[in-house]
Image: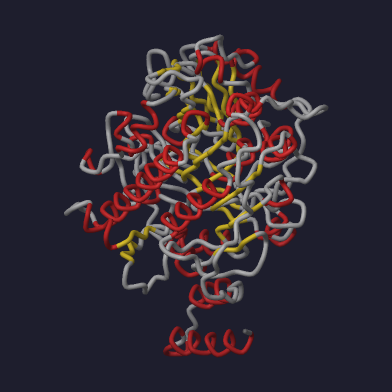
Amino acid sequence: MLKKLAIGLVVVLLAAGLGGFLNRKAIILYVATHSGRVEVAGPVEIAWDRGPETAEMVAADRPPNIVFILVDDLGINDLSTFGGGVAGGRVPTPHIDRLAADGALFTQAYAGNGTCAPSRAMLMTGRYPTRTGFEFTPTPPGMGRIVSMFANDMDRGALPPIDYNRDAADDAVPFPEMGLPGSEVTIAEVLKDQGYHTVHIGKWHLGRSAESNPNAQGFDESLLMASGLYLPEDDPDVVNAKLDFDPIDTFLWARMQFAAAFNSGEWFEPGGYLTDYWTDESLKVIEANRNRPFFLYLAHWGVHTPLQATREDYDAVGDIAPHRLRVYAAMLRALDRSVGEITAKLEAEGLAENTIIVFSSDNGGAGYVGLPEINQPYRGWKITLFEGGIRVPMFVKWPARIAPGTSVDTPVAHIDVMPTLAAAAGARLPEGVEIDGRDMLPGAMGTGTIRHPDDALFWQSGYYRVVRAGDWKLQLDGRQGKSWLFDLANDPTEQANLAGARPDKLSELQALLDAHQEGAVSPLYPYTLESAIVIDKTQAESAGPGDEYVWWPN
């Protein structure tokens, strides 16, 4: 490996050093990406653990199976359920729409954070970062330095440069250890103690150490997304869309591999396009466990970059422009197909009536893909805490207990998923552990209400902190010293900042934020990158002097 790296570096030096000048960016990118590459074996047939050949208990006594489908970076306007649909509605999502219509649709559902990993930690534990310390998204070695260097060499318009704290990065714990502490109790552990067979498939992003990997956090089996390509870049069946305006995309294409791992074993090639592969394996899991209670956590990578679609899906969505939107739409088509195949499998196995399906996204759509409509009508993107960054779909289908066409208007968030699934399974929450989330089932079944303390939900990333209490939402950007106060009942898309006009509400919500921080644990690791993210423009557009932005530390 070292010999290959050295030879490759010589080639890069020769190519980049014409005229005696070395291209520092090319050298750093090459070393940071190629030094971390892992040998990947050929495809492997997964031998899933099989349950009994006959049912262990009568149907009336059996707790519900649970399938939790989490997608990545989905914009709220990508789903035709909400009246929009990707590419101006040209690519509908009929299977996801049916899932939403067949159960409870939470009309004001929120991610736990504006980036993926903290949201996933809250989904698993039902706890805020103030209790777990899991506040920032882990990034691979070299990513912060490369992204900041590339971004600051791009035309960022009126935006200030990205700040990279190299000392903090050098002192940080290794990437595999940036995970959920073993002392935290996940929903998988709770369900496993209740007699469920627990399976994880797809993305994890909560650590790969001996105490933080999926098997250590309650999953009997784990088929892990080991890297990040959906197919090899040169596969004849793939259509790629690279984003020359996004430094994150530059890093991903250079660093990511096409790889999976089973139960923390060696890396191997997945058996097809990643979305379809995870789906096919999920169908096998459902079949293998049809005679015992099971929990399947299917964490899709789509529609996260790098943008890659199968040629079949690309052709099927039609002549959509620009190219990146067509690839994005094709990726969404694959996700919708996945939901359809899973629901059909449950029906075929006779499991649909007593199976809970939860569908959500880890955060809102990303502005760095350069697609302006994905979060409409809301402002903001992933990597902000405006509604566009944290408004997500949340559907819960349970035919045995939840009536089709149910609509729940109470605000809920990812912290509520863990106690909801525990309640559905008849499991006790862990003793001695403060759970911040609340059971959503009373609202979904029409038997009661969902009430958080002070009717408040909280979000944070370092000095950027937000609270929604009732219909009022306060955002505080500590680096800018700027406040945004919105009355969501009358201004759900956050157009009119009332921070100057309503000092009473500003003070009231500030007090809630202060109280939320009392006794908070320190982050598990520090942030190393601070980026200014424009609220109302994608990264493909140039920021002007009057454009509002937030500072995001990670």
Question: In x, y percent, where is residue 46?
Answer: 57, 62
Front-most of residues 430 and 383? 430
x and y, in percent, of residue 196 in the image: 67, 39
At 74% from the left and 33% from the top, the residue drawn is 131
User: Is residue 455 rendered to the left or right of residue 195?
Assistant: left
Q: Can residue 192 be seen by looking at this rendering?
A: yes
Give the residue at x 54% y 53%. Answer: 202
The residue closer to the viewer here, 434 or 375, is: 434
Q: Is residue 427 above or below residue 160?
A: above
Left or right relative to 202: residue 207:
right
In terms of image quadrants, where is residue 65? top right
At x 30%, y 42%, the residue is 372
Task: Say if residue 504 shows up in the picture.
Answer: no
Residue closer to the observer: 101 or 413: 101
Say left or right for 98 vs 305: left
Q: Is residue 456 above or below residue 341?
A: above
Q: Position of residue 455 (x, y in %)?
A: 59, 14
Determine whether 18 is above or below 305 in the image.
below
Specify whether 455 is left or right of 109.
right
